[in-house]
């Protein structure tokens, strides 16, 4: 039986989203203009918790709207839709494929959803209009109007309090415990994905920018999956590993040793081990760096920074402008330092129980950034 005591009133963002969509419908009714659904949809997608997030989302949605409108307009002008229903389906399939592909190349992944919505609606309904190209332009404008209404509502009328805004600017981090990481099988053993960016991407689809994982190699010999368009870093955590890059070189890794190689190389691995992997799409830079107890530094929040823990009872202290944090992590736990706005946080990694300086690394520093 459901416990109705757990029911709470709608949250602030829920109300803002509903109001923004309703305003769109009302304004379009007054104007007697078509396209209210697109405007309301854009307003719903664009509404965010904070002003900064709403403005950023608005910019991304405008880019996606223009991209979807341009793609749809190009197909309409080409006349391909006029042949048959089969040509319409082919245009939808090819158009969406290239639309998503171009959005990834332009690094506007946050715009993909609204871009595809605009594209499909325009392509589906344009044939009913007297002037398909004029219809395409108007539907693009409708989406932009919905985005503007959402941003203005969040910025001018329902601006979050200074306390709420400050909370969004506070430093944040995420701890992933070893036992919470899902195991996936591969032909050579087991792999555990620690982080992938963007978070909605999938390794199998090769649509990610970078990926951090650890793997257990159970075969004495195994082949690495080829990943064209990616750079790879691998570190030996435990066991034995020799890598043979066909036509390039052969490397025997020592414990905590690192090798860099191109994803498209044919690479063979010899030896049973546990390793740590960083995959970077070409155009990004980063790497793996083993660090000892006492390691410290600063983080400005722009790029990815995380730590893979190598031993038990590792303490990481983080000092931000708003608050200090302390986390104790154990072997194979993982911590991701979060994004901040206009501030820098200091951090220090120690093993309090160790006497003096630790001679062995206690964690691996993982970085990824756009060139």
Image (cartoon, rainbow, N blue to C red):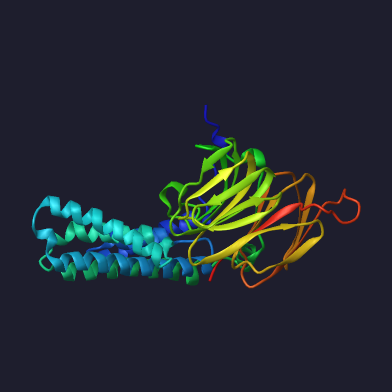
Left or right relative to 103: residue 208? right
- In depth, the one of 7 and 244 nearer the eye is 244
Does the image show residue 9? no
Q: Is residue 19 above or below residue 334?
A: below
Give residue 157's position: percent from left, percent from top. 48, 69
**Residue appearing at x 19%, y 53% in the figure:** 90
Does the image show residue 274? yes
Find the residue positioned furthest to the top.
1
Give residue 11's position: percent from left, percent from top. 52, 52
Left or right relative to 320: residue 160? left
Quarter of the view holding residue 180: top right
Left or right relative to 62: residue 37? left
**Residue appearing at x 43%, y 55% in the figure:** 207
Give residue 226's position: percent from left, percent from top. 45, 50
Q: Is residue 135 above or below residue 228?
A: below
**Residue appearing at x 13%, y 63% in the figure:** 129
Left or right relative to 368: residue 155? left
Quarter of the view holding residue 323: bottom right
């Amino acid at each position: 039986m459901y416990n109705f005591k757990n029911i709470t009133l709608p949250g602030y963002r829920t109300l803002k989203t509903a109001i923004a969509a309703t305003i769109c419908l009302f304004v379009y009714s007054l104007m007697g203009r078509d396209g209210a659904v697109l405007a309301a949809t854009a307003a719903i997608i664009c509404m965010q918790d904070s002003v900064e997030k709403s403005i950023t989302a608005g910019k991304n949605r405008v880019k996606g709207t223009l991209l979807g409108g341009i793609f749809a307009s190009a197909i309409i002008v080409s006349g391909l839709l006029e042949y048959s229903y089969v040509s319409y389906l082919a245009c939808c399939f090819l158009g969406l494929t290239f639309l998503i592909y171009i959005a990834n190349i332009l690094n506007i992944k946050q715009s993909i959803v609204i871009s595809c919505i605009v594209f499909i609606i325009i392509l589906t309904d344009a044939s009913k209009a007297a002037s398909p190209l004029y219809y395409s332009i108007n539907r693009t404008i409708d989406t932009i109007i919905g985005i503007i209404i959402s941003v203005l509502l969040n910025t001018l009328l329902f601006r979050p309090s200074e306390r709420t805004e400050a909370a969004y600017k506070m430093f944040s981090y995420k701890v992933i415990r070893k036992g919470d990481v899902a195991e996936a099988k591969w032909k050579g053993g087991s792999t555990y994905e620690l982080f992938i960016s963007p978070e909605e991407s999938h390794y199998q689809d090769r649509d990610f920018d970078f990926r951090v994982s650890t793997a257990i190699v159970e075969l004495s010999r195994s082949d690495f999956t080829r990943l064209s368009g990616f750079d790879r870093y691998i570190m030996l955590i435990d066991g034995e590993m020799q890598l043979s890059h066909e036509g390039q070189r052969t490397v025997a890794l020592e414990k905590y040793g690192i090798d860099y190689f191109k994803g498209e190389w044919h690479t063979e691995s010899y030896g049973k081990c546990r390793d740590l992997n960083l995959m970077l799409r070409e155009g990004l830079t980063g790497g793996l760096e083993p660090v000892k107890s006492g390691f410290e530094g600063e983080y400005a929040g722009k790029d990815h920074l995380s730590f893979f823990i190598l031993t038990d009872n590792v303490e990481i202290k983080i000092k931000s402008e708003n608050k200090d944090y302390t986390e104790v992590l154990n072997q194979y736990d993982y911590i991701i330092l979060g994004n901040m706005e206009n501030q820098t946080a200091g951090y220090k990694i120690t093993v309090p129980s160790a006497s003096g300086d630790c001679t062995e690394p206690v964690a691996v520093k993982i970085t990824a950034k756009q060139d």
